[in-house]
Amino acid sequence: MNHSTGDIRAVEVCNLTKIYGSGNTEVVAMKDVSFDVAKGEVMALLGPSGAGKSTLLTAIGLINPPTSGRIFIGGQPVMDSDRALVNLAAFRRKHLGFVFQKANLIAFLSAVQNVQIALEINDVAPRAARKRAMELLDYLGVADRAKNLPDALSGGQQQRVAVARALANQPSLILADEPTAALDSGRGRQVMELFRKVARERGSAVIVVTHDHRSLDVFDRTYEMEDGRLGAASIGHSA
Amino acid sequence: MNLAAQDIRQNIGRFVLTALGIGLLLMLVLGMGGIYHGLSFEATQLVDQIGADFWAVQKDTRGPFAEISRLPANLKFRLLAVPGVQSAHSFVSHTVQREVQGKPLRMFVQGLDWPDDRGGWLRLVAGRPLAQGHYEMIADKIIGLDLGDKILLGKDIYTVVGLTGGMVSSSGDGMAFFSARDAMDVQFDVSGETARLERAARRARTASQDVGRLQPELLERVGGPSSTLPALAAPLVSAILVNVAPGADLNTVVATVSAWPDVTVHTHESQRQLLLHGNVDRARRQLGLFRVILVVVSTIIMALIIYTLTLDKTHDIAMLKLMGARHRVIAGLILQQALLLGALGYGIACYIGQWLFPLFPRRVMIATTDLWVLAGIVLAISVLASLLGIAQAMRVEPNKVLS
Ligand SMILES: Nc1ncnc2c1ncn2[C@@H]1O[C@H](COP(=O)(O)OP(=O)(O)O)[C@@H](O)[C@H]1O
Ligand SMILES: [Mg+2]
């Protein structure tokens, strides 16, 4: 495998295994999972509830260390088993963007501030952060709600703000766990197409956990997960 | 963007209410110190205002403010004969509680050495000093009398001719100034029946002794007013106040008088120290302890509030951590809220105290240093209070976002 700077792989995982608990209560949530995603690629992760999709996504997201296996992001080794090889918080803020089923916006910040804070955390000056946050909201079509608190936004609007926040620092990898589950199918598809647009335009890799089979044509590659194991990829629903 | 300010803006009602509570507690902390300063001030204001260089009191006593001190009034003339003494006044004081127009009237009676001393040194807020040797009084406003009021004390009616402000004894009773003679009359007033019985008893005692039997004329004398009896001493005074002449050496005069076997001398400064240590010291320690308890209570309440504010934000904090926020961003959010809460509480304490303290029945004196000390205390408890919340926030895992 080649992990030099010219590598086009955004993320690569090798033999990831996650065991929750021990003894009687032991649950093998993820077993020997290996795959990689190229820059600009949009990948879907399907599978029944309890298959281990979230476990895999949070392991890659560096918030839920695997029991064994290795994770490379942008060619850089970041996790070896449950051992961090980099400063995880710093790595997350520079390279990763997250979107969840719930938008998880910070309740006491307005829409634009929710995006702005992600930039400020990454040492962007407040003014520049504000400007960029407004641009992102505009890009996602929610600029008119910039000053509203999350409570005042619809689910779809909240989710678009969350996507804007995930995009803010131009992450090399965007992780989305059932981002459209709370949206109607039309809006759900919009969000999926947005991911694709971002991947194409900005070269980010995107991994999306989804149940929504109607949007699968958006993805470059689709993996099915079952009982902690990753099945074979089906490639190329879309052009 | 300031996260702490944004959070507070969204929870402004709860925050202000909390600050109000903290502010009131801090006001009590401030007030306790103010009450102590007030006690010290009130305890020493009489000796300070009188400004005598030294006080001659009954041998081995600590003066009229600490215990009963009795001296013959003529000691004044002995003192005046000491070289270097410029003036000497007798001093009479005692607390009386009488009923006037159905209401209890409590006052700390001071005798002024008429005619040398008419109360000209008093800071009057209305009226004038005494203009005659009898039946006039100067009262403190706190007693509740007005200029021109006439009150019956003993057998005589006294007119209020002057008012002072804030002249109270160390136990908080308003002071009333009379000529020394009137002050003694008020103190030693006895009913006609008591006087008659006392005269009869004197007569009987004398009649049962040789001297009475041999000199029947004497029986007539002892049955008369006590002031006409050479064998009975004039009423005693509490102390003699002495001022030394300009240029005379205070220490020499004090040394001379101290050597007398029947008096003890307290200088102005030692009188102050006696007052502060005797009467006020225990109150000071009492108030000090209360202050400490209040500070601890404020800290605990503040810590709990900061802690619950932090708990309420667990999800937001997890999200911030997920986004890769540094520890100091999150600790800063909590610390800043604690400091803001403290600062707001401090402002409220000062503001409310400023108009509330003057309404207190006893004097509450706030010095600038007290404000600085309180600011220091607030800073310390804010930091301390935030620690619990910060510890809680540090424990939050970023994957808490998912639950
Ligand atoms: N924190 C946890 N502790 C114990 N078991 C867990 C935990 N999180 C997930 N699991 C278990 O791991 C398995 C995979 O869960 P998850 O990754 O959430 O699946 P999915 O997202 O595909 O529905 C499930 O059996 C689940 O019960
Ligand atoms: Mg899941």
Image (cartoon, coloured by chain):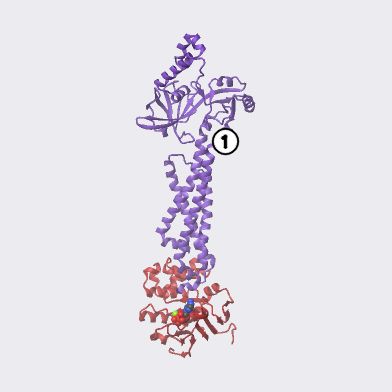
Identify the residue at image location x=48%, y=66%: A127
B369 in relation to B315, above or below: above
Identify the residue at image location x=49%, y=12%: B212
Q: In what quadrant does ligand 2 lie?
A: bottom left
A91 in relation to A230, above or below: above
Tag 1 secondary structure: helix
Q: Is residue A174 visible?
A: no
Residue A19 picture location, percent across and down: 52, 81
Q: Nearer the viewer, residue A9 or B125?
A: B125
Instruction: Say few, some or many: other residues with alpha carbon within 10 Å of mark 1 (under 14 / 14 to 19 / 20 or more).
Output: some
Mark 1 CB lies closer than 8 A to ligand 1: no
Residue A184 picture location, percent across and down: 35, 79
Q: Residue A14 occupies which quadrant of the picture?
A: bottom right
Identify the residue at image location x=60%, y=83%: A4
Colour seen for chain A: red
Q: Nearer the viewer, residue B37 or B57?
A: B57
The mark total stands at 1
B143 in relation to B380, above or below: above
Residue B331 picture location, percent across and down: 52, 64
Chain of residue at mark 1: B
Colour seen for chain B: purple
The amino acid type found where label 1 is placed reads Gln
Residue A3 picture location, percent across and down: 59, 84
Quadrant including the C terminus of chain B: bottom left
Q: What residue is shown with label 1?
A: B273
Q: Residue B131 occupies which quadrant of the picture?
A: top left
Q: Is residue A86 visible?
A: yes
Identify the residue at image location x=53%, y=83%: A17
